[in-house]
């Protein structure tokens, strides 16, 4: 049985953390049963320290012990800000939205913290709402579409289908949640609910929207759990070198005989059995003769770093791993001294590629992170990230079935990426952060240099009929206003303190906004 030894101050607070109330629910529409919590720790029974990413569902076989997302960056005073939950010994994330600007949690405006809605429920709601005898599911009725504006929260939160296009979520008149897949769990978390007792990091002011969803099918999607993550900087801290990392404690059946690897061409990290037989772990079953492979891939962004995890005790240790460095901040190097960004990036079936097989590492318990990056992440900036947890098992290979499962995992990854690009990428995209489409930046608008020392050039598309162009700081104070709207190119000096400023352009057909960063 797996025993966790956590060498950090968070371990001291574990008794306090376990006494805190949290909510959990399982999504198990297809061949996977995955436990989700509102604590930012996923696929794990926190209280009993048990793996809860079960596949195939109902067998007791599990392939992930714990999963989480980490967030970190450096402010203008060279101070690290970090939220990095792992096993729930402490708390870095709390349920509920936060206010814009001050990033204060306030009072959760909802009577719940997780919403579980199926496609069947939505179809039934559309067909029967308003009819005698219809009982609306509570998670549709109380979908977190709107925040509490009296507390400074965004009016628009979770995506919904607005049937009458009035901008108000009204399920009694046919509005309903916008979910992906056949079944989905939605939760909103933040990192400002208190001290970060798991990582020890300084808070950021993040609002995090998670949608876990599954598709029931007769192909590899039936073994897949998708994750959509919306990261919003509700606070005024401008962070540079901002990383979002997926943290995976892979346990493919028996946890002491695992290998890990990465694939930068597929934006994926994965784990597989080091040998051809997966033993039982005490009273918990192993996969035996046909060990599978499991991976998580980023579907809409580029993996910048993929590293194994060991010996992270301080916030800076965690951040260094997120950016592909060792505990002292030096980039990882291979045996020749070359800097590496991806741990064991080769196919373990290829004797000439770099993998744990070819370098003959001793198998053991494995943990890994995969990072994406933004150079700057300031007030109201967002990251919309999509992931897929994929699983493959070759039950026909007579030689090295553990490695044959990796080959199938690569094939599954290609299939999943194509499916996402074709059918899923643009679903539920019509409403972002409380801004309607006319508020989102015009793609032909150019601002450079950005970031700058104060002088910026703003080039407007010639087709725009501009009525107003103004720049204000994050508190709403106006710092610049243009009066000559006949020009397409404007040279602007923002003689203000370093930080994030908002350019707003109002035209005869809509409104556009863009961030300007002053260093």
Image (cartoon, rainbow, N blue to C red):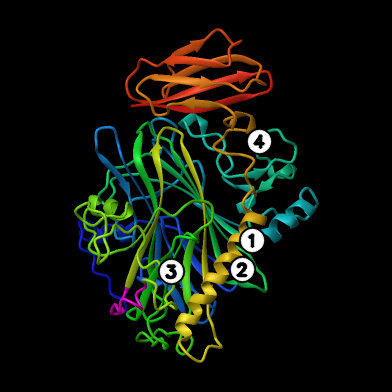
Q: Earlier in the sequence, mark 3 or mark 2?
A: 2
Mark whose residue sits in front, 3 or 2: 3
Helix, strand or loop at mark 4: loop
Mark whose residue sits in front, 3 or 4: 3
Q: Distance of mark 2 from mark 4, alpha carbons?
A: 34 Å
Looking at the picture, tell me which residue is in the foreground, 68 or 119.
68
Magenta stretch, residue numbers: 355-365
Which label was assigned to residue 168?
Answer: 4
Q: Is residue 290 above or below residue 443?
A: below
Q: Earlier in the sequence, mark 2 or mark 4?
A: 4
Magenta stretch: dominant secondary structure:
loop
Q: Is residue 291 left or right of residue 172?
A: left
Q: Marks 1 and 2: in contact by CB < 8 Å?
A: yes
Quarter of the image with the N terminus is: bottom left
Q: Distance of mark 3 from mark 2, alpha carbons?
A: 17 Å
Q: Distance of mark 1 from mark 4, alpha carbons?
A: 32 Å
Q: Is residue 292 above or below residue 99?
A: below
Q: Distance of mark 3 from mark 4, alpha carbons?
A: 42 Å
Q: Disc 2 designates what residue? A: 221
Say which quarter of the image contains residue 378.
top left
Q: Is residue 346 visible?
A: yes
Q: Marks 4 and 3: in contact by CB < 8 Å?
A: no
Q: Disc 1 designates what residue? A: 419
Q: Position of residue 294 (x, y in %)?
A: 47, 72
Residue at x-position 31% and y-position 74%: 365
Q: Is residue 75 above or below residue 480?
A: below
Q: Distance of mark 1 from mark 3, alpha carbons?
A: 20 Å
Helix, strand or loop at mark 3: strand
Q: Is residue 361 magenta?
A: yes
């Amino acid at each position: 049985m797996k025993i966790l030894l956590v060498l950090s101050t968070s371990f001291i607070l574990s008794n306090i953390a376990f006494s805190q109330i949290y909510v959990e629910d399982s999504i198990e529409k297809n061949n996977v049963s995955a436990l989700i919590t509102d604590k930012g720790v996923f696929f794990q029974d926190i209280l009993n320290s048990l793996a809860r990413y079960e596949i195939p569902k109902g067998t007791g076989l599990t392939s992930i012990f714990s999963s989480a997302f980490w967030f970190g960056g450096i402010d203008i005073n060279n101070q690290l800000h970090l939220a990095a939950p792992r096993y729930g010994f402490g708390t870095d994330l709390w349920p509920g939205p936060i206010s814009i600007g001050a990033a204060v949690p306030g009072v959760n405006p909802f009577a719940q913290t997780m919403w579980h809605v199926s496609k069947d429920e939505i179809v039934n709601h559309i067909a029967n709402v308003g009819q005698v005898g219809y009982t609306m599911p509570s998670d549709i009725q109380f979908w977190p579409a709107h925040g509490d504006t009296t507390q400074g929260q965004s009016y628009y939160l979770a995506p919904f289908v607005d049937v009458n296009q009035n901008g108000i979520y009204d399920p009694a008149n046919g509005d309903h949640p916008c979910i992906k897949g056949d079944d989905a769990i939605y939760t909103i978390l933040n990192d400002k609910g208190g001290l970060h007792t798991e990582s020890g990091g300084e808070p950021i002011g993040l609002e995090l929207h998670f949608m876990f969803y599954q598709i029931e099918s007769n192909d590899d999607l039936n073994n897949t759990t998708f994750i959509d993550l919306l990261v919003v900087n509700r606070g005024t801290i401008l962070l540079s070198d901002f990383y979002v990392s997926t943290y995976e404690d892979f346990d493919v059946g028996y946890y002491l005989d695992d290998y890990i690897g990465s694939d930068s061409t597929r934006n994926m990290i994965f784990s597989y059995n080091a040998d051809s037989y997966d033993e039982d772990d005490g009273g918990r079953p192993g996969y035996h003769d046909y060990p599978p492979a499991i991976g998580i891939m980023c579907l809409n962004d580029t993996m910048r770093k993929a590293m194994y995890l060991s010996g992270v005790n301080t916030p800076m240790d965690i951040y260094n791993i997120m950016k592909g460095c060792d505990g002292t901040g030096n980039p990882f190097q291979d045996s020749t001294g070359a800097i590496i960004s991806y741990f064991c990036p080769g196919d373990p079936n290829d004797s000439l590629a770099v993998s744990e097989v070819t370098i003959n590492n001793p198998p053991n318990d494995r943990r890994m992170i995969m990072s994406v990056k933004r150079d700057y992440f300031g007030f109201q900036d967002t990251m919309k990230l999509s992931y897929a947890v994929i699983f493959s098992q070759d039950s026909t290979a007579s030689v090295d079935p553990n490695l044959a499962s990796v080959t199938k995992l690569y094939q599954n990854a290609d299939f999943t990426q194509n499916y996402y690009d074709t059918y899923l990428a643009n679903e539920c995209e019509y409403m972002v952060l409380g801004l309607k489409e006319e508020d989102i930046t015009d793609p032909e608008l150019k601002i450079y240099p950005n970031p700058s020392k104060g002088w910026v050039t703003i080039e407007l598309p010639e087709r725009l009929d501009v009525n107003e162009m103004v720049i204000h700081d994050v508190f709403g104070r106006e710092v610049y206003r243009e009066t000559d709207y006949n020009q397409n190119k404007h040279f602007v000096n923002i003689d203000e303190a370093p930080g994030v400023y908002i350019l707003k352009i109002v035209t005869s057909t809509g409104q556009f906004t863009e961030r300007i960063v002053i260093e």
